[in-house]
């Protein structure tokens, strides 16, 4: 059953490359029966994805991936099964969308200092909206030959300490959980092994997340190794969290994060999607 569930993916509403309806067709082809669209800081793609899912007979959850600042660290919290009409949620997301505009301008200024002109105009074109993210800058920088591929462009320009990096000032953890719960949703801490936190800091984060009412941990992600999956399964159990699985799909051209890979929870914690399988 878990092989046909994927609760984390992106469309053109944020930094994915497929339109929501195209994405849903790929989801169906991949044999996924229950899925969520979780764009960064927006639910703009949800209504077209929901319509496409209905037409294909797939179970669909309205979702979002909220950018959170936890101390100096950026972490991501996925919200699942949201009422996208909730004004508390949408006001919160609107703040993050507004912050993204100013941050993109600052990234553009920092790249200009490096002699790279026109990045913001190009990034906006890649984004197709004001919801500009680092991925859109990355595509421009690769296209212009400043780096050979997406991994290297992040490493050279867009990660902490690099010329095009702007320290994030996103939502607080408690705020993000508040918006998700106000919208009737379920909160999942996304790709925990990606944050390069040491054991103590990881346990502090999980403790605060669980204390604030977070429901689940994304134990299985395409960015987790086998070992990391088992570590996260044990941590989820220790902190009383359910388990989630997500590809974090963005782009058919990125081989390590495709749809339809087998994603199975190791089994110490109950699947977060039990509640939607009734
Ligand atoms: P943002 O929310 O605008 O700061 O962008 C974060 C997004 O950038 C993530 O969701 C990924 O899609 C992408 N990203 C971050 N780090 C990397 C990396 N090292 N390689 C490729 N993509 C990355
Ligand atoms: Mn992304
Ligand atoms: Mn993420
Ligand atoms: Mn994601």
Image: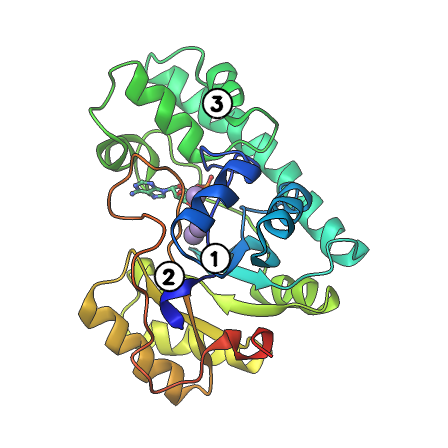
Please, what secondary structure does the residue beneath circle 1 have? strand
| 19 relative to 259 in the view: left or right | right
Q: Nearer the viewer, residue 212 or 4?
A: 4
Q: In which quarter of the image is residue 144?
A: top left
Residue 150 position in % (x across, y down) = 28, 33
Q: Earlier in the sequence, mark 1 or mark 3?
A: 1
Residues 219 and 58: in front is 58
Q: Under tag 3, what secondary structure? A: helix
Q: Which of marks 2 and 1 is nearer the N terminus?
A: 1
| Side of 231 where 21 appears, left or right | right
On-image quarter of the N terminus: bottom left
Q: Which residue is drawn at 33% across and 29% down?
A: 163
The answer to whether the beta carbon of the residue marked 2 is less than 8 Å from any atom of ligand 3 is yes
Kindly indicate whether the residue at mark 1 contacts the one at mark 2 (C-beta within 8 angstroms). yes
Q: How far apart are marks 3 and 2 (CA)?
A: 25 Å
- How busy is the neighbourhood of tag 1: few (under 14 within 10 Å), some, or many (20 plus)? many
Q: How far apart are labels 2 and 1 at the CA level?
A: 8 Å
The correct choice, above or below, for 260 with respect to 98 in the image is: below
**Residue 191 badge:** 2
Q: What element carries label 2?
A: loop
262 over 151 or under it: above or below: below
Write down the residue under mark 1. Answer: 76
- The residue positioned 36% from the left and 28% from the top of the image is 138
Q: Is the CB atom of the residue marked by disc 1 within 8 angstroms of ligand 3's nearest atom?
A: yes
Residue 203: image location, x then y, percent: 37, 78
Residue 26 sits above or below residue 141 on the image: below
Crowding at label 2, few (<14), some or many (≥20) Cα neighbours within 10 Å?
Answer: many
Residue where numbered disc 3 is placed: 126
Q: Which of 25 and 78 is in front in this view?
A: 25
Q: Name which residue lies at 59% across and 31% down.
A: 102
Q: Is residue 184 above or below residue 67?
A: below
């Amino acid at each position: 059953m878990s092989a046909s569930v994927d609760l984390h993916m992106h469309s053109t509403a944020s930094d994915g490359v497929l339109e929501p309806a195209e994405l849903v067709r790929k989801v169906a082809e991949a044999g996924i029966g229950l899925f969520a669209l979780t764009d960064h800081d927006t639910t703009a793609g949800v209504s077209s994805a929901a319509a496409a899912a209905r037409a294909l007979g797939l179970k669909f959850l309205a979702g979002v991936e909220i950018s959170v600042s936890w101390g100096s660290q950026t972490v991501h919290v996925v919200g699942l099964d949201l009422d996208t009409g909730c004004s508390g949620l949408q006001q919160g997301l609107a703040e993050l969308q507004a912050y993204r505009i100013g941050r993109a301008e600052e990234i553009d200024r920092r790249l200009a200092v490096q002699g790279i002109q026109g990045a913001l105009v190009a990034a906006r074109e890649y984004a197709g909206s004001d919801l500009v993210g680092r991925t859109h800058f990355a595509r421009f920088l690769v296209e212009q030959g400043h780096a050979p591929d997406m991994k290297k462009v992040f490493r050279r320009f867009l990660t902490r300490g690099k010329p095009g990096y702007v320290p994030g000032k996103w939502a607080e953890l408690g705020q993000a959980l508040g918006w998700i719960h106000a919208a009737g949703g379920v909160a999942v801490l996304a790709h925990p092994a990606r944050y390069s936190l040491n054991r103590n800091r990881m346990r502090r984060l999980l403790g605060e997340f669980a204390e604030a009412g977070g429901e689940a941990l994304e134990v299985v992600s395409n960015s987790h190794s086998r070992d990391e999956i088992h570590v996260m399964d044990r941590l989820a159990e220790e902190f009383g969290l359910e388990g989630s699985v997500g590809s974090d799909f963005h782009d058919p051209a990125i081989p390590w994060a495709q749809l339809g890979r087998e994603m199975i929870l190791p089994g110490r914690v109950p699947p977060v999607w039990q509640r939607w399988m009734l």
